[in-house]
Image (tube, helix red, strand yellow):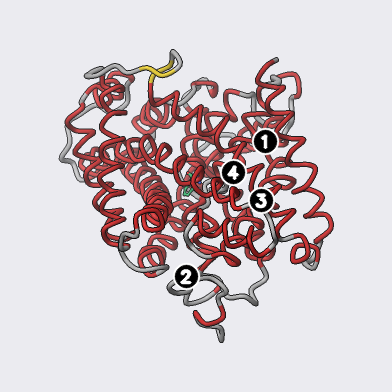
């Protein structure tokens, strides 16, 4: 890469060591619990293939264009969310109020972190349990609803896991610019990929009828599709690509000005989609092998999978591999989320990266502890009548992400119109950002009200 920091129009302090590193980092952010935990269960709840089709449409028409837009805003305006919007708005003669989109993204990131880090902690605890069983040390029975309830009822164990997650994330987010992310992606990226392919191969070989699983995922049964599925597909397309929270603004800021953003964004979206499909194949392959109900909901990977692992040869090793892969995916997303919050604290309070990262870690710990209090029943807080964790997930995915994603689309279509028009498929991109995205938001709102 010939372009160094000098080529950046933004005040970003650093750049990726290569474009491949950008793709790795952005994929590390995108691939996470959304792919492993959430995608399979919402596909299950919505009846399989038809939902997958709607979801893929949302990815192509909304997700990819907004991903491109976010990266370009960061490359233009720098790695601090509000400042990036302000700089891009000023350059285009638009209102400085657009900076609020950056603030909204960072605030939403903190809300997501509060529950995301807790679930990452569950994955870690399951991973520990399976690792112990795999080396013949554990005695606990993992394959039951009771184990999951015991875990979610144990506030102390969850806070312990959260503490590990938050401090480990701090260790990487406190490093300057892209450095910490590169350091972790260099080995976690390949390790995750190897585990995922091994697990998929094992599922294909061990399953008596692997094509039934493929058919379930690809053959559309539109009768199973409820109107609310559309909103869910949009929300998930945003969540899984990490868009709407300005995470890609931050990572885009470290990109050189000659890089082809659409090509890199397409690479990220493709990796994310392949991972989601492989995860769904693994999860349903394992679940179907025991005759489980795919519409099980959020407990799918924590209750149904362990039951199936117990019934299969080398199940403990497979379980350990599954939860290790899930942890790596989730952890690199936690780091990406923490970096957004941290950059926002830097720009708001003039804090250094280290101090801002420490504050972010403490905020994650506090938010996560409140969520744990609600989950474990120690402090049964409810929000809009739902348990706190579910409410946070629903508010962020179904409301805040679509709203901020659409604002980003509309902003980019105005502030970066000339630049976007000059890209390959530039006119189509601009059309998606200007028209399809706002219309889709109306569609989501309507589908919620139906
Ligand atoms: N994409 C992540 C996942 O699928 C979650 C996520 C949503 C995220 N928005 C983000 C991660 C922003 C980092 C930054 O699990």
**Residue at (70% x, 61% y) in the render:** 92
Lower sequence index among marks 4 and 2: 2
Asked whether residue 364 appears in the rendered view, the answer is yes
**Residue at (66% x, 50% y) in the render:** 66
How many angstroms separate mark 1 from mark 4 (CA)? 9 Å
Lower sequence index among marks 1 and 3: 1
Q: Name the residue under label 4.
A: 277
Q: Which of marks 3 and 4 is in front?
A: 3
Quarter the C terminus occupies: top right
Q: Nearer the viewer, mark 4 or mark 2?
A: 2
How many angstroms separate mark 4 from mark 2 (CA)? 35 Å
Mark 2 element type: loop
**Residue at (49% x, 79% y) in the render:** 5
> As rendered, which of 52 and 320 lies closer to the eye?
52
Q: Name the residue under label 3.
A: 66
Across and down, in percent, residue 351 comes to: 31, 59
The crowding category of the residue bearing disc 2, from other C-alpha atoms within 10 Å (few below 14, some 14 to 19, many at least 20), is: many
How many angstroms separate mark 1 from mark 2 (CA)? 38 Å
Q: Name the residue under label 2.
A: 12
Looking at the image, the residue that sits furthest to the right is: 427
> As rendered, which of 230 and 40 lies closer to the eye?
230
Q: How many marks?
A: 4
**Residue at (38% x, 41% y) in the render:** 113
Residue at mark 2: C-beta within 8 A of ligand 1: no
The crowding category of the residue bearing disc 4, from other C-alpha atoms within 10 Å (few below 14, some 14 to 19, many at least 20), is: some
Rendered position, 175 above or below 273? below
Mark 3 element type: helix
Q: Write down the quadrant of residue 440 in the picture.
A: top right
Across and down, in percent, residue 295 comes to: 54, 21
Q: Name the residue under label 1.
A: 52
Across and down, in percent, residue 396 comes to: 50, 33
């Amino acid at each position: 890469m010939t372009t160094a920091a000098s080529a950046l129009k933004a005040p970003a302090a650093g750049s990726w060591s290569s474009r491949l590193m950008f793709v790795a980092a952005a994929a590390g952010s995108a691939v996470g619990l959304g792919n492993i935990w959430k995608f399979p269960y919402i596909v299950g709840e919505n009846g399989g293939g038809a939902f997958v089709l709607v979801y893929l449409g949302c990815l192509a028409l909304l997700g990819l264009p907004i991903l491109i837009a976010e990266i370009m805003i960061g490359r233009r305006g720098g790695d601090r969310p509000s400042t990036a919007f302000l700089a891009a708005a000023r350059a285009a003669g638009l209102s400085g109020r657009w900076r609020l989109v950056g603030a909204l993204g960072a605030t939403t990131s903190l809300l997501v972190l509060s529950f995301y880090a807790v679930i990452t902690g569950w994955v870690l605890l399951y991973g520990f349990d399976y690792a112990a069983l795999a080396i013949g040390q554990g005695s606990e029975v993992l394959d039951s609803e009771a184990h999951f309830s015991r875990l979610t009822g144990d506030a102390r164990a969850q806070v312990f896991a959260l503490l590990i997650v938050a401090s480990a994330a701090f260790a990487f987010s406190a490093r300057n610019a892209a450095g910490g992310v590169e350091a972790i992606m260099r080995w976690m990226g390949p390790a995750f990929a190897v585990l995922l392919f091994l697990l998929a191969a094992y599922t294909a070989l061990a399953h008596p009828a692997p094509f039934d699983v493929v058919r379930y995922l690809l053959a559309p049964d539109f009768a199973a599709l409820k109107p609310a599925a559309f909103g869910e597909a949009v929300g998930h397309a945003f969540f899984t690509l990490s868009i709407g929270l300005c995470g890609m603004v931050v990572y885009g800021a470290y990109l050189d000005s000659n890089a082809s953003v659409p090509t890199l964004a397409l690479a990220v979206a493709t990796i994310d989609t392949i991972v989601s499909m492989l995860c769904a194949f693994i999860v349903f392959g394992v679940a179907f092998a025991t005759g489980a109900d795919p519409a099980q909901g959020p407990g799918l990977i924590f209750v149904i999978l362990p039951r199936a692992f117990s019934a299969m040869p080398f199940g403990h090793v497979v379980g350990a591999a599954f939860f290790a892969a899930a942890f790596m995916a989730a952890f690199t997303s936690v780091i990406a989320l923490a970096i957004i919050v941290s950059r926002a604290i830097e720009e708001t309070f003039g804090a250094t990266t280290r101090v801002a990262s420490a504050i972010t870690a403490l905020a994650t710990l506090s938010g996560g502890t409140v969520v744990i209090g609600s989950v474990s029943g120690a402090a049964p807080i409810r929000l809009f009548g739902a348990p706190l964790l579910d409410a946070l997930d629903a508010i962020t995915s179904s409301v805040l992400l679509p709203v901020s994603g659409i604002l980003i689309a509309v902003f980019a279509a105005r502030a970066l119109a000339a630049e976007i028009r000059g890209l390959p498929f530039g006119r189509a991109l601009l059309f998606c950002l200007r028209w399809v995205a706002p219309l889709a938001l109306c569609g989501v709102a309507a589908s919620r009200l139906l």
